[in-house]
Amino acid sequence: MTAADHPPYRFVHRIRVGFDETDAQGVVYYGRYMPYFDRARVEYLRGLGLLTTLAGEPEFVMRAQHVEYHAPARFDDELEVYARVERVGRTSVSWAFDAYRADTGEHLVSATQVLVSIDPATRRPVEVAGAFRASVARFEGQAVEA
């Protein structure tokens, strides 16, 4: 599948479930989904050339996360984790994620995250960089709210 198969997503990252990510019931432990979302977000940013920051430049920190579980994933399942920027605010960015089992298309998990742009020296919110806004707008198009 591609991101085009799951509008409004334009980005997908594949992840295979490791044995160490499952619990005694043989399913992915619920807390293991957060690293899946983080990896998808990192790869999204890498693809847009936004992954690296210079010392002293603003950084993003997690403000909030909401997750809903729909079905279990198991050891060795290949997952497709879809990621997109839903909104770029003055100092924050809202993300959406959906994970599906790659072979069946079964919807496993939905999540949202809000990250805040901060000055690393003061740890206080600062405006989201214009370069970030421009890159995301080019990639996502009209799907991103301002």
Image (tube, grey):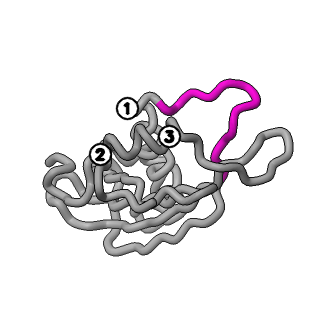
Name the residue carrying label 3.
132
Residue at the spot x=50%, y=40% of the render? 132
Taking 3 as reference, is 22 left or right? right
Circle 1 sits in a helix, a strand or a loop, which is it? Answer: helix
What amino acid is found at the position of numbered circle 3 in the picture? Phe
Circle 2 sits in a helix, a strand or a loop, which is it? Answer: strand
Question: Residue 80, how many percent across, how many down?
Answer: 28, 50
Contact between labelled residues 1 and 2, with CB atoms less than 8 Å apart: yes
Residue at the spot x=70%, y=32% of the render? 57
Q: Earlier in the sequence, mark 3 or mark 2?
A: 2
Name the residue carrying label 1.
47
- Judge depth for marks 1 and 3 and give the one in front: 3
Name the residue carrying label 2.
11
Label 3, label 2: how many angstroms apart (C-alpha)?
Answer: 16 Å
Q: Is the magenta stretch mostly helix, strand or loop?
A: loop
Position above or below: 65 against 52: below
Q: Earlier in the sequence, mark 2 or mark 1?
A: 2
Label 2, label 1: how many angstroms apart (C-alpha)?
Answer: 9 Å
Taking 125 as reference, is 85 left or right? left
